[in-house]
Amino acid sequence: MSGSRRSSRAYGHNASTTILSLLALFISVRGSTQVAAAKPAVVSIPSSDTYLLPSNFEGNSSLKFVDTTSHNAQIDSLLTKAKAAPFISYDQEFLDLLGPNPTPHLVAEQTDLFAYEGGVWYPNRNEVWFSSSPVPPPTHLTVLSLNTNKLRIPNIHPPILSPNGGYYFDGKMYFTSIGNASIAPGVVEIDPNTYQSSYVVNSYFGAPFNGPDDVTWVRRGQNKYMFFTDPAFAESFGFRPESFLPNAIYRFDPQQQSVAAVLSRADILNPNGISISADQSTLYCTDTSPTFPIGPVPGNGIGGSSSGTLGIYQFTLDGQSKPVEKSLVGLARSGIADGVKIDDSKRVWTAEGEGVVVHNAAGKVIGVFNADFFLESAELPSIANFALAGNKLVILAVNRIWVVELGRTLVNPKRFQ
């Protein structure tokens, strides 16, 4: 980002104004968190309506499900109500998850696309770390305190060039770095107390990675492993020169001091978000392979000739902590499947065109945090990521941040130790 001044708004508990010199970002903190509505609507749609409609219904994958026209007055009325609702339920499990009075709180808003990727909960200070939109480059990190709803820009040193996806593990923050034409991309470790950073990996036997997108850590017994996705998105958007390596998911093994590709583009053509289940047994990854171009520079299967799938996959980790037994969790109904998180009940949460979509452990879509409500404008990019923070969902709505307190604890901080 340039050093120009950008206006922004954040809503906290104390009336004050904080001037952050880094990036010349001005954040004004107002007297109280803004609440979207006194009693936001939860619209429940029968599960049967998701797979059985009147035979003359009108809808397609370029539209959201709530934009479907069924030509049944009762169903169409329900879908119209759902368009304006923050929460759309397809199952009692989702209603139980929401609790009796779910309320979205708008805690921050800016004029730029500051809240886009990452979505990493740091439980020690109850804060969420996230990165800005990669368009235009470079990206930067911001931290939201869930105790005060205040934002700050961490003074990372050395600075990370275009951070993107991230994960908290064993006392450290890990973020991918997209790099640029002259600086190699990689995965960076950050001490959240000192903000000291250092590269973990940035080379595969002398070949630069394409531009790691997301990262997760797995602990198996006494051993630990770092998995990260490496698609060619940076090349497609013109951030990096032509890719040297095919798209892949890599595993870094600190015990053996080695990095190796463990899933190829034959398994997932354009690997994007990646996450691990709480029991450390199952690896999840999204495939961002649309049939429409997602960048100005076509490359590596991204675009109209893509042979991949806009879906979420899971892999069992075998005795050597390698991913096997691939299975499809689900397809993105609209847009792409980007960020993915797994809660302690093995529900799969993904950021998609419809919003934040929740699958239960069996793969059923049980509900959606509706993008039409949480995004300020349909002209903005889709929601790309979010954070699960204890019993809160933090939605990174591109130029806004929403916090929803839920009726269930989603993640226990002990899983990240």
Image (cartoon, rainbow, N blue to C red):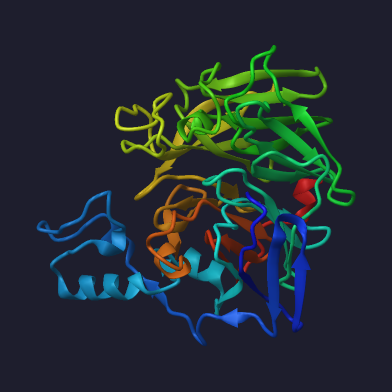
Q: Residue furthest left?
A: 56
Q: Is residue 280 visible?
A: no
Q: Residue furthest bottom?
A: 38
Residue 306 on image: x %, y %: 34, 29
Q: How many marks?
A: 0
Residue at the (78%, 58%) spot, across then down: 123
Q: Which picture quadrant has residue 106?
A: bottom right
Q: Nearer the viewer, residue 136 or 369?
A: 136
Above-or-below relation of 362 to 40: above
Left or right of residue 79, residue 340 in this image: right
Above-or-below relation of 296 to 117: above
Above-or-below relation of 312 to 108: above
Q: Is residue 377 visible?
A: yes
Q: Nearer the viewer, residue 410 or 399?
A: 399
Residue 341 on image: x %, y %: 59, 49
Q: Which picture quadrant has residue 310?
A: top left
Left or right of residue 268, residue 206 in this image: right
Residue 90 on image: x %, y %: 39, 64
Q: Residue furthest top?
A: 205
Residue at the (37%, 62%) spot, across then down: 378
Q: Nearer the viewer, residue 67 or 115?
A: 115
Residue 83 on image: x %, y %: 34, 70
Q: Residue furthest right?
A: 194
Residue at the (75%, 36%) spot, across then down: 188
Residue at the (71%, 33%) spot, across then down: 187
